[in-house]
Image (cartoon, rainbow, N blue to C red):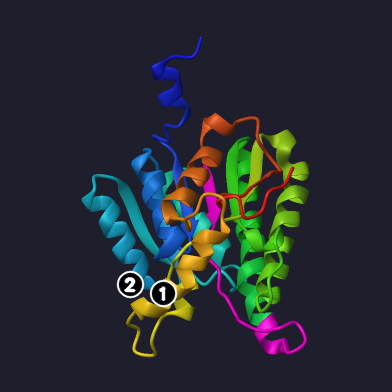
Amino acid sequence: METTESVHGAFDLTGRVAVVTGAGGGIGRTTAEVLAAAGAFVVCADINLSGTEETAEGILGAGGAAEPAQVDVAARGALSELVARTVGMHGALHIMCNVAGIMIDSSIIDLDPDEFDRILSVNLKGVLYGCQAAGRVMVEHGAGSIINMASAAVLTPAPGVGAYAICKAGVAQLTQSMAVEVGRHGVRVNTVAPGYVPTNMTARYYTRPDGTIDEEAKAAVLTPMAKFTPLRRVGRTSDIGYCVLYLASDASSFVTGQLLSPNGGVAMHY
């Protein structure tokens, strides 16, 4: 029989160590906050050092455990060094969240090869490097959960974001392939594919050159986005963070190789 204690315990991450890339803001920051609130020690990693320091400080201020780390996920060896340092300092790595990502706006026809290389380096290769670094440690340990961030763009194509969608489709396939390879070692690998969530990355449509928000333009973007979803709202970063918590926790111990898409119903799939 399941009890209050067993249900709470299924989501309890006390004693576990997590690395979250892209933790300097947006979905990555909220993911780090959620995992820390569930009891994990969180290494908040981002290329933006001040952003990840702010995330870690917020977690510490709320009574959680965290530390900042600067990392460029696109740099070969950078995530291996981060994982090795984390294991050396904290004794283990139980959860790896590959959230860091960038966006470029371009049609497929006009896509610049250099820009495509840049987004591939971060959004696909960066996830691969994170999977490899964490996977080696977790396989040796005989347990672990890797959560990769994709996008609902892999389920619902849209103009102008093809390069981004290509990378995220690669992440979804990477997840499935790795899940098959490491499952016998007790390691789970899953994907979260969010729908539209207002973050610094998605705010480019209503952010002025000086960095301030154009509220009229913001409403013009978000209102139709909300009307387009069956739930009649856009996503919140916490909607994604709690999906990550599920996949990181024992509550999902029989889940691997799956794509979970919190998108308000914009894309529905079997």
Name the kind of residue labelled 1 in the image. Answer: Lys
Q: Residue 268: percent from the left, percent from the top?
A: 68, 48
Q: What element carries label 2?
A: helix
Q: Give coordinates of residue 164: x percent, y percent.
A: 65, 72
Residue 222 belongs to the span the image colors magenta = no
* Mark 1 residue element: helix
Is residue 178 or residue 7 the one in the foreground?
7
Q: Main secondary structure of the magenta part?
A: loop
Q: Report the residue marked by disc 2.
A: 50
**Mark in the foreground, 1 or 2:** 1
Please tell me which of labels 1 and 2 falls first in the chain.
2
Name the image quarter holding the C terminus: top right
Residue at the spot x=58%, y=42% of the render? 145
Q: Specify whether 154 is left or right of 20.
A: right
Answer yes or no: is residue 87 visible.
no
Instruction: Find residue 129 and report its horizontal and vertical position in percent.
Output: 64, 62
Residue at the far top in the pictured view: 1
**Picture coordinates of residue 160 (x, y %)?**
66, 79
Residue for point 25% across, 51% down: 60
Q: In which quarter of the image is residue 105?
A: bottom right
Which of the numbered marks, if any, corresponds to residue 218?
1
Spatial CA span between label 1 and label 2: 26 Å
Q: What stretch is highlighted in magenta?
A: 93-116
- Which residue sits at x=56%, y=49%? 262
